[in-house]
Image: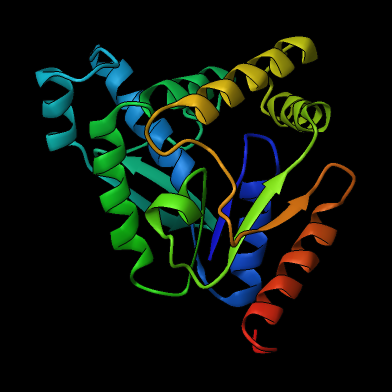
Amino acid sequence: MTIDGPSGAGKSTVAKCVAARLGFTYIDTGAMYRGIGWLARERGVPFREGPELDALLQDASLAFEEHHDTTRLIVNGEDVTERIRSAEMGMVASDISAIPSVRHWLSALQRSLGERGNTVLEGRDMGTVVFPDADVKLFLTASLEARGGRRAAELCARGEAVALSKIVEDLARRDRNDSSREIAPLRKADDAIEIDTSALTVAEVVDRVMQAVERRRGGRV
């Protein structure tokens, strides 16, 4: 199953809940872009095609590990789960995701994870590029205001005080970046089921996703 959509639409929360309901593995592909962005920034590697970035990807190792009911992202042996969740790292992920070599490298890794079966992959091009033949495709969206409020709450819970206006501005800029890039732009797959989460609770969205799964699978969930 794939769940795509813009930042703040609720993909991660919903994907985790749906995976738990189905007994599937949850894969956060956005975290993978953040992880590569973090690694490049830590090593001072420019966000552009070139030998430095090629060498970084050749040496990079990304893995998800389960610890005490939480999924951790391990980059080159280092747990970066908390460090990649800032608003700044979100923009870093958007920038580096437009680089062809990065997308090729991570798409190959994502396919290898998804091909194991029984997975819920959430991101921006899962249903359009990485898994165009997925059994079930969802596209979550929400108003910019709703998404900004959710992101502000997330950052506040982590002790980051960021003005709502700045968050909304960053989200709008990321939407433009993700939707206008030449390679794998953010868009709804033709056969994806779209759900506007603006006025829905997480439980309501999860229920709608599960109903969609049941319909697509002929009543078998």
Counting from the top left corner in percent of width and height, residue 133 is at 43, 67
From the viewer's perspective, tell me whether residue 219 is left or right of residue 176: right
- At a point 81% along the width and 28% down the height, the residue shown is 149
- Residue 151: quarter of image: top right
- In the image, residue 14 above or below residue 219: above
From the viewer's perspective, tell me whether residue 209 is left or right of residue 53: right
- At a point 31% along the width and 38% down the height, the residue shown is 103
Counting from the top left corner in percent of width and height, residue 118 is at 46, 74
**Residue extending furthest front?**
190
Q: Closest to the observer: 122 or 81?
A: 122
**Can residue 137 be seen in the rendering of this structure?**
yes
**Can residue 77 be seen in the rendering of this structure?**
no
In the rendered view of the protein, which quadrant contains the C terminus? Answer: bottom right
- In the image, residue 152 above or below residue 139: above
- Residue 217: quarter of image: bottom right
- In the image, residue 180 above or below residue 14: above
- At a point 51% along the width and 73% down the height, the residue shown is 135
- Residue 45: quarter of image: top left
**Residue extending furthest right?**
199
From the viewer's perspective, tell me whether residue 150 is left or right of residue 94: right
Counting from the top left corner in percent of width and height, residue 193 is at 68, 60
